[in-house]
Amino acid sequence: MTALGAPPAPSAVRRRREAAVPAALVSLALLGINALAYLFTVFAARLLVPEAYGELAALLGVMFIGVVPATGLQTAAALTLGRSTPEERPLLVRRLHAASWVGAAGVGILGLLAVGPLVALLHLSSATTVLWLLAALVPHTLIGGYDGLLQGTRRYGRLAVVISTLGVLKSGGGIAGLLIGGTPESGLMGMALGVTTSATVSWLVTGRPGFARGVRPHIFAAARASSALLGLVLLVNLDLLLARHHLSPDLAGEYAVASIFAKVAFWLPQGVSVVLLPRLVHQGARRRMLPAAIALVAAVGIVLTSATAVLGARALPLVGGAEYGAALGGATWIFAMLGSLFALAQLLLYSGIAAADRIAAVAVWCAVALEVVAVEVLAAGAGLTVLTVAWIALGTSLLLVGTGLLRMWLAHTSSARETLPV
């Protein structure tokens, strides 16, 4: 019984409800911007010929890899602020903001060095498209820092505003560019203008944070997070890049359209990871919350994969038009399952980063190496098709998630034994 006149302790149901509100808010914002990104890819697939769309899809895959420093800054900031006290946060916010600007400058320098190799690797006709891609990545890196500041301080309403603004201006600018110019270059130009405007809005919404010295530990923390996340982001886009490199332009274009299903399955449950991340720094929270989060993400994946399987051979023409689907037929469900496995791998990797578990990052990079070797061996033997690339990606991702779940179960079992009374 509680003392007379003392306020009752909040019930478990109330606590779960209070935690669900920000998760739902951020999830809705992420769902909205990913729906816009989906509309952009569908619009581009229908507007551009398969060869041009294959080029744009490959560049968007590079963009997905190029925002890894932004995600690393966001992850490091969220974890740093998640373990801090209210008194420490004002100074930490200024230092983390300064670290974001240093990270953005680093992205710009590395991007300029990568222009030539990307043109050769992706068989591009001009370097201009890569430069416009870089013009979008630099402000994108800053926005990742602002996301981390809001995420770590649990200002989820403002975080939803920043996420939504980026989605509207980035996808809207890309669609406007495609409508005006009708080329991959014009689409990327519109994206760059939209992301730059969004970075300014994000700074205002975050509260116009200033700068402070002492950024070196935060740069190193972001670099460690980025090295782990780079492996995952590369894995998520690796099959698309390998298909672009090895398959004919028409088949690479069909593979790119099918990859939309993987991206949707990967995007949908990301709100769970965003809200959960700052709490994963505490071991007890990881043990309580991670299994339920994995079950939720898996359930979303099962629904999406089943729906795609029911659509069968109609799935790909529904997204890209009648000219797509000859090579894949009714096997588009493989891509929905692949994206669902990517979402599970991301959640497990976030848990590993929060727990300072280096094996989680090593496992991701091993999956990347395994997929590259398998594809190259088949390509050397002239046995590579659209379906074989997809099956290889699915197999390596399934192996990664399976080993991650096994390691999580062993860690939770060991922790439970340690807490048992002697």
Image (cartoon, rainbow, N blue to C red):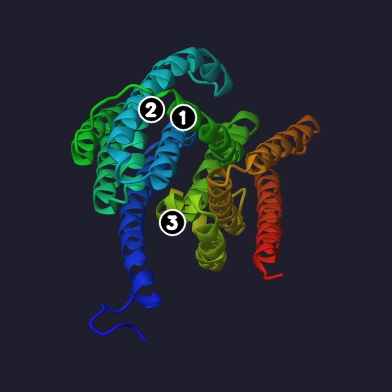
Viewer-proximal residue among 145 and 160: 145
User: Sequence order check: which comes first, mark 1 or mark 3?
Assistant: 1
Name the residue beneath numbered marker 2.
137
Q: Is residue 138 above or below residue 290?
A: above
Measured Cα–Cα span from mark 1 to mark 3: 21 Å
**Disc 3 to disc 2, C-alpha distance:** 23 Å
Q: Residue 194's image quarter?
A: top left
Which of pointers 3 and 2 lies earlier in the amino acid sequence?
Answer: 2
* Residue type, mark 2 in image: Leu
Where on the picture, by quarter, is residue 333? bottom right
Say whether marks 2 and 1 touch (CB < 8 Å): yes
Q: Position of residue 283 (x, y in %)?
A: 55, 55
- Label 1's element? helix
Q: Nearer the viewer, residue 157 or 215?
A: 215
Q: Which residue is mark 1?
A: 66
Which residue is label 3 attached to? Answer: 268
In the figure, is residue 109 to the left or right of 206?
Answer: right
